[in-house]
């Protein structure tokens, strides 16, 4: 599970051979949320509002989205 970014103490990861839809795992302290790369919607989990906003802002940035999709394909997301 490679870490692809850190944002203000939030770890962003993509797991090897993970299930669809393409998504990232964001973790901070005791919270974890899965966010769909295509539209930055929450797939599972929960996060404090302010931290979730940072994650969705990161995912919706066009350059970050391209990079995340490339990494998803590279790491063998199914």
Image (cartoon, rainbow, N blue to C red):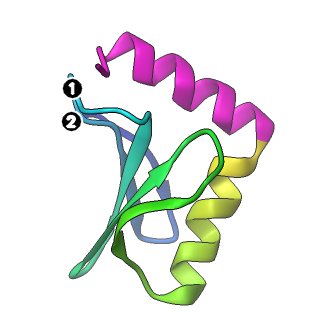
Is residue 15 depicted above or below 69 in this figure? below
Is residue 68 rendered magenta in the image?
Answer: yes
Q: Which quarter of the rendering shows the N terminus? A: top left
Q: Nearer the viewer, residue 34 or 43?
A: 43
The residue where tag 1 is placed is 16
Label 1 with label 2: CB-CB less than 8 Å = yes
Q: Nearer the viewer, residue 25 or 2?
A: 25
Which quadrant would residue 9 be assigned to in this image?
Answer: bottom left
Residue under the point 26% across and 33% down: 19
Numbered tag placed on residue 59 in the rendering? none
Which is the main secondary structure of the residues drawn in magenta? helix
Judge the density around disc 1: few (<14), some (14-19), many (≥20) Cα neighbours within 10 Å: some
Label 2: state its secondary structure.
Answer: loop
In this picture, residue 11 sits left or right of residue 39 = left
- State the residue in front, 31 or 43: 43
Residue range corresponding to the magenta coloring = 62-78
Residue ID at (45%, 21%): 71
Q: 10 Å neighbourhood of mark 2: few (<14), some, or many (≥20)?
A: few
Residue 11 belongs to the span the image colors magenta: no
Q: In whole angstroms, how far apart are the C-alphas of marks 1 and 2? A: 6 Å
Image location of residue 57, percent across then percent down:
70, 61
Which residue bears the numbered disc 2? 1
Q: Does 61 appear above or below 76?
A: below
- Quadrant in which the C terminus is drawn: top left
Considering the numbered disc 1 on the image, is that residue within a helix, a strand or a loop?
loop
Q: Which residue occupies 21% across, 26% down?
A: 16
Task: Using residue 62 as the reference point, say whether residue 49 is left or right of it.
Answer: left
Residue 11 place in picture, x, y as percent: 37, 58
């Amino acid at each position: 599970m490679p870490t692809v970014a850190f944002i203000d103490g939030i770890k962003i990861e993509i797991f090897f051979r993970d299930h669809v839809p393409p998504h990232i795992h964001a973790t901070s302290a005791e919270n974890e949320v899965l966010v769909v790369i295509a539209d930055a919607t929450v797939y599972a989990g929960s996060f404090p509002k302010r931290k979730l906003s940072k994650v969705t802002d990161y995912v919706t940035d066009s350059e970050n989205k391209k990079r995340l999709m490339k990494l998803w394909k590279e790491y063998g997301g199914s």
